[in-house]
Image (cartoon, coloured by chain):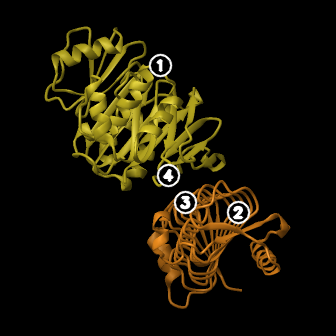
Amino acid sequence: MCGIVGLHLRTPELYPQLGELLSEMLGEMSDRGADSAGIAVYGDPVWSPPGRGCVSVTDLDTVPDLGPDVDVVTVDKSFLLSADLPSEQLLDRVRAAYPEALIAGFGADLAVLKGVGHPRTLTERWGLSTAQGWQGVGHTRMATESAVTPSGCHPYTVGPQQCLVHNGSFANHATIRRDLRREGVVFDSENDTEVGARFVAAQLAAGRDVETALKELCATFDGFYTLLVSNHDSFAVVRDAIACKPAVIAETADWVAMASEYRALSGLPGVESAKIWEPEPEVVYAWTR
Amino acid sequence: MDAITQFDLATTGLREVNAALHKAGVTGSFVIDKPAGAHNVAVGVNAPVQVTVNGHVGYYAAGMNQLAEITINGNAGTGVGENMMSGVVRVTGNASQSAGATAHGGLLIIEGDAAARCGISMKGVDIVVGGSIGHMSAFMAQAGRLVVRGDAGEALGDSIYEARLYVRGAVSSLGADCIKKDMRPEHHAELAELLSAAGYSDDTAEYSRYGSARNLYHFHVDNAGSY
């Protein structure tokens, strides 16, 4: 099953409420996936200090120590690192020092948290309700394609500032993974969604825009999917041609939100007067702030 | 006049509300406020009661309905009115996929759009959609009538049996064994009746009828390649 939520705020007055709104949205989707969860928050000044390179790390037994220039914020079992360096350089240092660590995400203004457990328990442990920012995505997982571990949790953030969350399953992921590996792409897991994320990242790295990348994904991947793909300033939604995995989009002057089911959106301010619709199959919907 | 019973789903549990609607010999009118997208609102009602739901509902709202008149003032999630047997279910907003799936009887009205698979495997229900319907609608539809005041998505009526489909707007494509058919006087008459029952007064001349070509209806070995 799995649940997806995403919130893209347009009104800066709402930025302080991002975490609170996202917590409630994710909690409502617990019934769709209660084994693990993950979130990405764009713009929290504590989790991802502005102007610094950021890397989110999980699945590490010790607090990472990369020297005095790298700050560490510990959030439950994750470590949010930041330094006055480009995120990619900080990422290289993390990988060199802690090759066993799971990189949950990296990029300016981005924090990614993942964990095994009930989504409501996790968001409480993370203190998500006090997080701020302009954009957040989340996922509640009911595993079908790979193990229940932090590495199997969405969002997959394999390119700088990019996140991908997925409801569904890709049928031909093994074939595409083999092709990408042959091109030198390194994978963290055997999860089908990671293949989608790395495919999109490779498309974006080749200079394509998110819309073209997702159209290419539709043409290449076989299976069921509703995908939410976010970047530093944008977020996009696409569904497969059969469109049996649910998705609802709501939009007001103050925000754009997406969720697997309407009930996740029912607590958003002004939702009563929002424009609400279901995304059409294989149509890419994208918003940029 | 019967009393109106009011429920607020923000403070009352859904099971309590549905249990009240399932009570033996239940009569009267019910208003359900603040559903907040909850699933299974007013399912399995089997009595001639009036139910008004104020707000958007989740999956299977008014499913398996018998005899009741249920109005949802808002949008409905997957499978609104699925397997309904009789009564009237009205959605004032849009409906998600599989509206009226497998329904045997009664009238389902969706004033807005209905998404994919509207009327899938319908078995006798009448469905009137004020707006447009999504892809694969009326898939394997066996009996009943589907009226669409807007457009229909891809593969309308794929593998259809004896349901009759009336569409006013464009049809993206017809599914296997579904064809356009002539509108004879009896079809104009039944369409006018369905529109009127749903509260519309369109000119039936604007509509086209679609139904089964009956080529795949029974298995024939020469058709094996068409399945």
- Neighbourhood count class around disc 1 (C-alpha, 10 Å): few under 14, some 14–19, many 20 upward: few
Q: Nearer the viewer, mark 3 or mark 2?
A: 3
Q: Where is residue A285? Give x, y as percent.
A: 57, 37
Res. B97 mark: 3
Mark 3 falls within which chain? Answer: B
Q: The chain drawn orange is chain what?
A: B
Mark 2 falls within which chain? Answer: B
Q: Colour of chain A?
A: yellow
Helix, strand or loop at label 3? It is: loop
- Neighbourhood count class around disc 3 (C-alpha, 10 Å): few under 14, some 14–19, many 20 upward: many
Q: Nearer the viewer, residue B143 or B80?
A: B143
Q: Contact (CB < 8 A) between labels 4 and 3?
A: yes
Q: Nearer the viewer, mark 4 or mark 3?
A: 4
- How far is mark 3 from mark 1, CA to CA? 36 Å
Helix, strand or loop at label 2? It is: loop
Of the residues shown, which amino acid type is indicated by label 3?
Gln
- Residue bearing the label numbered 2: B111
Q: Nearer the viewer, residue A89 or A188?
A: A188
Q: Are marks 1 and 4 on the same chain?
A: yes
Res. A32 image quadrant? bottom left
Q: Are marks 1 and 2 on the same chain?
A: no
Helix, strand or loop at label 4? It is: loop
Of the residues shown, which amino acid type is indicated by label 4?
Ala
Q: Nearer the viewer, mark 1 or mark 2?
A: 1
The answer to whether residue B13 is above or below residue A4 is below
Tag 4 or tag 1, which sits nearer the N-term?
Answer: 1
The residue at the point 34 percent across, 34 percent down is A156
The residue at the point 41 percent across, 24 percent down is A161
Q: Is residue A112 left or right of residue B117?
A: left
- Residue bearing the label numbered 4: A243
- How far is mark 1 from mark 4, CA to CA? 28 Å
- Residue bearing the label numbered 1: A207
